[in-house]
Amino acid sequence: MSNNKKTTIKDIASVLNISPAAVSKALHNDSRISLKTKEAVKKVAKDLNYQPNHLASALRKGKSNLVGVIVPRTNSNFFSSVIENMEEALNKEGYNIIITQSNESYKKECRNIDTLLFTQVDGIIASMANETTNLEYYEKIKSKGIPLILFDRGENDLNVDYIGINDYDSSHLIVDHLVQQGCKRIAHIGGYKHTRIFNNRIRGYIEALKKHNLPLEDELLIESSLTTKDGREKMIQLLSLKDKPDAVYVAGDYAALGALQVLNEQGIRIPEDIALVGFGNEPFTAMVTPAISSINQHSTEIGKLAAKTFLEHAKKTIIEQSLNKIILDAELVVRDSSNIKNS
Amino acid sequence: MSNNKKTTIKDIASVLNISPAAVSKALHNDSRISLKTKEAVKKVAKDLNYQPNHLASALRKGKSNLVGVIVPRTNSNFFSSVIENMEEALNKEGYNIIITQSNESYKKECRNIDTLLFTQVDGIIASMANETTNLEYYEKIKSKGIPLILFDRGENDLNVDYIGINDYDSSHLIVDHLVQQGCKRIAHIGGYKHTRIFNNRIRGYIEALKKHNLPLEDELLIESSLTTKDGREKMIQLLSLKDKPDAVYVAGDYAALGALQVLNEQGIRIPEDIALVGFGNEPFTAMVTPAISSINQHSTEIGKLAAKTFLEHAKKTIIEQSLNKIILDAELVVRDSSNIKNS
DNA sequence: TATATTTGCTTAAACGTTTAAGCAAATATA
DNA sequence: TATATTTGCTTAAACGTTTAAGCAAATATA
């Protein structure tokens, strides 16, 4: 049944008594091959169930038509949506993608980079793991002359193309909204300060508080790994304060969920006693009770733009040094968890 | 900066004045190469920042050391956990994986299969899209002699290795549990009948009802696409019945969530008025109010076993026809949505 | 009709590895 | 000391493509 020997261009050539080179050209619609030969070749190719050997053509052309993708995890609506849209745009141009996940681990991320380089990808589109501070492996990609595009979790120091949302402004949006709802003591459970996006959210939070002449207190600004579990712990920490906050802005939806669980368990009313806002607009924010207000990160747009940026690199032969930093405006989706006036 | 010409085995050879073949053997620790030469080669390789060209070696060896993975979507805890564990096991043996998602679309799935075959993967591990009924593309994989392993969503007709849970028994677990809670009119929002796993769940449901001498009524058994949206609609349909059910068993967690939303919106008490059970044990089942009872599908185990099964194929040179059908026992995680006696 | 151009192919080499076969020198065995 | 074996390499070919260069026949142009 399974005809183990795969059909090659040579098999087609020998059937038609022409050279393998002619077959290759016929399959690629070379203008110097007659229509008659092209049709014959394509017919035989189909009959013999010919499948081009990608490895051979990639080796010969020095181009694999594969793009490597690194994300902290695929099990998040944001990342899977980015990937979906990126893939669609790249497929259209004949590229396929290889998805790898770092699980937020620096070591795993390094291994992923090695894997992708080893697979001879034509470019890498990545969002960095939380743990990553050492950029050596990313420098390695750059030094090989392989296009590198970062999205969401990026680093300024790397000096590569980047697509993300305006984290600083997002914090302003959130604080403005909470102030408008009447909140006066707004806490922030933020991500790791060393990660640029989280640092920007923290900066935005601080500046927005100043703007509204609200107290900026150390005990209200907490650094977190932003997992659901850590969200719980940091919320408990906030509730142990003598002077509790009346609003909590959490820099990630999963951690916001943990905070919500704690508030619900302790019978604290949301948003009347404490208003809650998350970040990322994961689908579950709309599913839980009360639904969590959150920032929409425009995953569709980010995916498309990342693909587009890569394609621009791939098309140009001259290596230009113009950087593409695309910062999208974020959008606050207000739900029950911070909608005091209507509740 | 970016030394564009990549280092090859020939570069190393010319530095040391030995043949490229000797370099290749030295790098692979061939016993016929002296320790001195090996060390010299490895040192030069490191100095020149040598990275083996995977395409060339794959072409020469006729083996890419890549395994293709097809899942309906990565944005589900079940699938991403399966992938994570599969990847870990395969990485250990020197294989890397390429993840693709079908988004439950038959057309996309076919394109994914073509992509993976084109990339010359050594094997494919897949879970089929909901839409898929035509098995032609999967037959194509088989006819090429490439190991194919299905998990969760598989088809008996394909006659390939399969890893999944016991769907039939799972339905029994659920119905037994609901009967024990005192439910007498148990509805089932099931998946597409043409998909084996959903068909097995339906069969299990029917048999379990018979076992308990409960009425089996057409209006209580509904076919669904199992999206959250469709779960809502089918729940509304059930609520419009003259004789409403006192329990609903939904064959997927996302649809169960839709059902839960409708019940909550209409002020129907869960589980007192209607008990609810889902399937898949997605993390959000524990997050919503009330938390949804669900079936744990052993994603960790499935991922590991799928990898193991592939590796067995890869190791044997003789093509054996012994099939591996691994059916794991499922486990019901009881939560508030069906816990009548304690509520 | 003579020359130039175009068409439709072939030939040969290359991409970077791996590996079978072979060979000289070193070492072991009789 | 003569032969056999082992060691440590080299040579050459191959994996399946693509592509530059070239050539004869067909066609176009002067």
Image: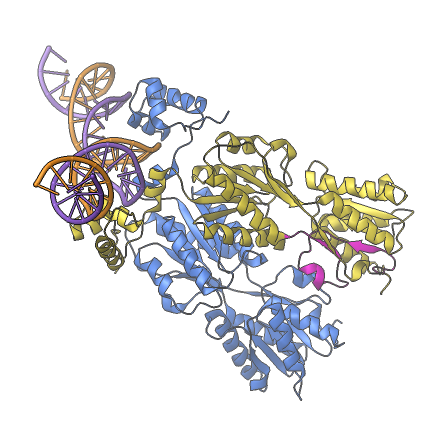
Chain colours: A yellow, B blue, C orange, D purple
The image quarter in which residue A341 lies: bottom right
- In the rendered view, does A314 fall on the left or right side of A183? left
Q: Position of residue A7 (x, y in %)?
A: 25, 51
Question: Is residue B159 at least partly visible in the picture?
Answer: no
Quadrant (top left, top right, bottom left, bottom right) of the C terminus of chain A: bottom right
| Above or below B204: residue A77 | above
Q: How many marks?
A: 0
The image quarter in which residue A57 lies: top left
**Closer to the camera, B294 or B101?**
B101
Question: Is residue A14 at least partly visible in the picture?
Answer: yes
| Type of secondary structure dominating the magenta stretch | loop
Residues in magenta, as a range: A269-298
- In the rendered view, does A278 fall on the left or right side of B176? right
| Above or below B259: residue B28 | above
**Closer to the camera, B106 or B338?**
B106
The image quarter in which residue B239 lies: bottom right
The residue positioned 85% from the left and 44% from the top of the image is A209
Q: Position of residue B152 (x, y in %)?
A: 48, 63
Is A293 magenta? The answer is yes
Q: Position of residue B165 (x, y in %)?
A: 50, 64
- In the rendered view, does B285 fall on the left or right side of B313? right
The residue positioned 44% from the left and 58% from the top of the image is B126
The residue positioned 73% from the left and 66% from the top of the image is B289
Q: Position of residue B148 (x, y in %)?
A: 38, 57
Quadrant (top left, top right, bottom left, bottom right) of the N terminus of chain A: bottom left
